[in-house]
Image (tube, rainbow, N blue to C red):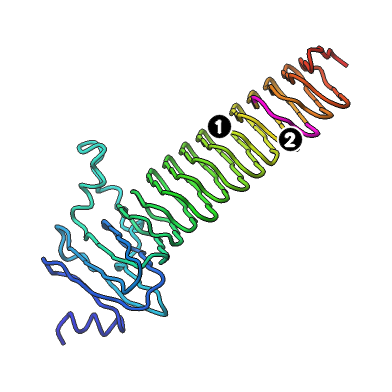
């Protein structure tokens, strides 16, 4: 039996493209999800109003790299034989020689997949090492494991995990965005509906406004920059990272464990601030309802707005400044506390 027939039989209905110097083109009907996994290559995605999925597979310099394509229950799967991490692919990326172009040069050996998909189709990348270029898909985007680097336009929602040094940019996220960075990667997006963001390492996240609630956590030296948050905001740092946000409409729970900094343009709602270490929390304006502040260490809290019923605990060499207050004041500890121009000394 010829090898091509044998491989096709072994994988059922899957189509296998390999050992071809020319592009292979296929069309697939009734597809709502495109899944790319265990794959290395470049992926270009164009969106049509509706219709079939068109797949154009252009082999790279290593024409023997297999591309397996099959469909099952509305899912178009594109994959190769093994998880790229098991091949230690990153050892073949010559960063020293090619610098910023190193990843693109590395991918020249691998296929370029060009897809035309209907608007709203979901995209999933799992254990894929990919350079992605896509327009407004308006569908869900999922990224797990691997290394996805590139740009995509507007999406319906995002469940994105960046491992290593990947750099990914998206347009507007119409729904929820769950973004996690493990390493030194970067992520950028325009407006999102709701946000769950975490960094473990030195990565960066930059977003415009969040229309609803936002939760941000940093473990390490990463940075998160947001526009306005039109819901509640939970921000925490363990380490030396920085979180910077605009106006927060729904109150905030902020905490720093270490030497990190949190800065907000303004607040409106119930507010808590905790610092353990030498970190700092700064809120430039607004109204903090039932403000609660705890400082343990040499860190500080600075608020340029109006606080109602502030309750402050500042130990050791901590500093607290509240420009103006309404209601009762409660202060404990031996820190340096100033509220509405009044200096509060040791207990």
Q: Secondary structure at mark 2?
A: strand
Residue, far front: 49
Task: Name which quarter of the figure residue 235 lies in.
Answer: top right
**Residue linked to disc 2:** 271
Question: From the image, which quarter does the N terminus lie in?
Answer: bottom left
The magenta-colored residue range is 284-291
Q: Position of residue 84 (x, y in %)?
A: 33, 58
In the rendered image, residue 225 lying in the magenta stretch gets the answer: no
Residue at mark 1 to residue at mark 2: CA–CA distance = 16 Å
Give above or below for 264 relative to 73: above
Disc on res. 138: none
The number of discs equals: 2
Give the mark nearer the N terminus: 1 vs 2. 1
Residue at 83%, 25% in the rendered image: 326
Residue, far bottom: 1
Q: Secondary structure at mark 1?
A: strand
In the rendered image, residue 286 lying in the magenta stretch gets the answer: yes
Q: Nearer the viewer, residue 233 or 61?
A: 233
Disc on res. 244: 1
Q: Is residue 152 left or right of residue 62?
A: right
Task: Name which quarter of the figure residue 139 lies in.
Answer: bottom left
Residue at 80%, 26% in the rendered image: 312
Residue at 53%, 37% in the rendered image: 226
Give above or below for 44 relative to 10: above
Q: Position of residue 194 (x, y in %)?
A: 58, 50
Q: Is residue 240 left or right of residue 10?
A: right
Q: Position of residue 108 (x, y in %)?
A: 19, 53
Give above or below for 49 relative to 262: below
């Amino acid at each position: 039996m010829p090898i091509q027939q044998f491989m096709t039989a072994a994988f059922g209905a899957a189509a296998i493209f390999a050992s071809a110097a020319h592009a292979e083109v296929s069309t697939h009907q009734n597809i709502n999800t495109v899944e790319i996994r265990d794959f290395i290559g470049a992926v270009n995605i164009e969106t049509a109003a509706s219709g079939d999925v068109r797949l154009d597979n252009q082999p790279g310099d290593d024409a023997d790299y297999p591309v397996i394509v099959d469909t099952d229950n509305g899912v178009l799967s594109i994959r190769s034989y093994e998880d790229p991490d098991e091949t230690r692919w990153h050892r073949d990326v010559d960063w020293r020689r090619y610098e910023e172009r190193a990843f693109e040069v590395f991918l020249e050996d691998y296929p370029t997949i060009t897809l035309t998909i209907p608007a709203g189709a979901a995209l999933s990348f799992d254990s894929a090492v990919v350079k992605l270029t896509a327009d407004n898909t308006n569908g869900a985007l999922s990224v797990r494991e691997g290394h996805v680097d590139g740009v995509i336009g507007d999406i319906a929602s995002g469940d994105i995990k960046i491992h290593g040094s990947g750099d990914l940019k998206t347009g507007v996220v119409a729904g929820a965005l769950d973004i996690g960075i493990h390493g030194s990667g970067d992520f950028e997006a325009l407006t999102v509906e709701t946000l769950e963001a975490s960094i473990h390492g030195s990565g960066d996240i930059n977003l415009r406004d969040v229309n609803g609630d936002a939760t941000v956590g940093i473990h390490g030296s990463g940075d998160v920059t947001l526009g306005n948050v039109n819901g509640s905001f939970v921000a925490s740092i363990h380490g030396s990272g920085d979180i910077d946000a605009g106006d927060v409409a729904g109150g905030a729970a902020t905490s720093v464990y270490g030497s990190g900094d949190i800065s907000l343009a303004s607040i409106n709602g119930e507010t808590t601030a905790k610092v353990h270490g030498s970190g700092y929390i700064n809120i430039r304006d607004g109204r903090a309802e039932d403000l609660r502040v705890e400082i343990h260490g040499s860190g500080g809290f600075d608020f340029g707005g109006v606080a109602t019923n502030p309750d402050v605990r500042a130990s050791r060499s901590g500093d607290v400044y509240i420009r103006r207050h309404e209601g009762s004041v409660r202060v404990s500890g031996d820190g340096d506390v100033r509220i509405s121009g009044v200096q509060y000394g040791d207990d």
